[in-house]
Image: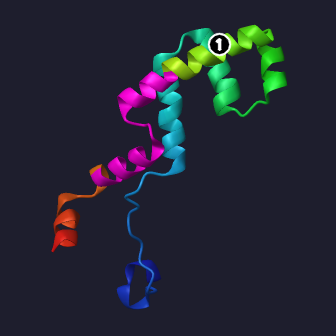
Amino acid sequence: MATIQIEHASKFLWRPDLHPRLVEFVADFALAGERALSPSRLILFRLYYLGGCEYPLARQRMGLSELGWTNWTDEIRRDAGRELLRSGMFPPSRYFREMSAQRVPKAEKDRGAA
């Protein structure tokens, strides 16, 4: 088994990925929506913002008028936005930078500083 015999291993050794990935951000985004939204708004959030359903089809499926759509999406952006700010997910660049810093073990931080 070459993977456990170092002399047969390639020069490309596996290293753990310490940086958050986009899928982790999307999962945290979905959880933030769940924490912030009422059930009906959560359905629209999942359908439109997470599922990528196009506006006309999402509006039709939810049975919303244009004014209803505007009101609901404004509420979603307001409530989910507050939760994203509270949880440190916004702006995304901050989320990825801070999460990376939290994941780096102290020994690696010390090595990098040396």
Q: How many marks?
A: 1
Camera-side residue of 59 and 74: 74
Q: How is the image coloured?
A: rainbow
Residue topped by disc 1 = 72
Q: Is residue 1 visible?
A: no
Q: Quadrant of residue 47?
A: top right
Relative height, residue 80 to residue 25 (above, below)? above
* Residue under the point 41% across and 61% down: 17
Q: Is residue 92 magenta?
A: yes
Whole-percent x and y of residue 54? Answer: 79, 30
Disc 1 marks a residue whose amino acid type is Trp
Q: Mark 1 packing: few (<14 Cα in 10 Å), some, or many (20+)?
A: some
- Between 3 and 16, the one nearer to me in the picture: 16
Q: Is residue 20 above or below residue 34?
A: below
- Magenta part of the chain: 80-101
Residue at x-position 37% and y-position 35% = 88
Q: Secondary structure at mark 1?
A: helix
Where does residue 50 sit, x and y in percent of width and height? 64, 32
Quarter of the rendering occupied by the C terminus? bottom left
Q: Residue at x 35, y 48 (%)?
A: 99
Which quadrant of the structure image shows residue 74? top right
For residue 33, side relative to residue 72 (left or right) = left
Dominant secondary-structure state across the stretch colored magenta: helix
Q: Is residue 32 left or right of residue 62?
A: left
Q: Is residue 37 visible?
A: yes
Q: Residue at x 40, y 44 (%)?
A: 95
Residue with the most extreme bottom position: 7
Q: Is residue 113 magenta?
A: no
Q: Is residue 19 left or right of residue 76?
A: left
In x, y percent, where is residue 40?
63, 10
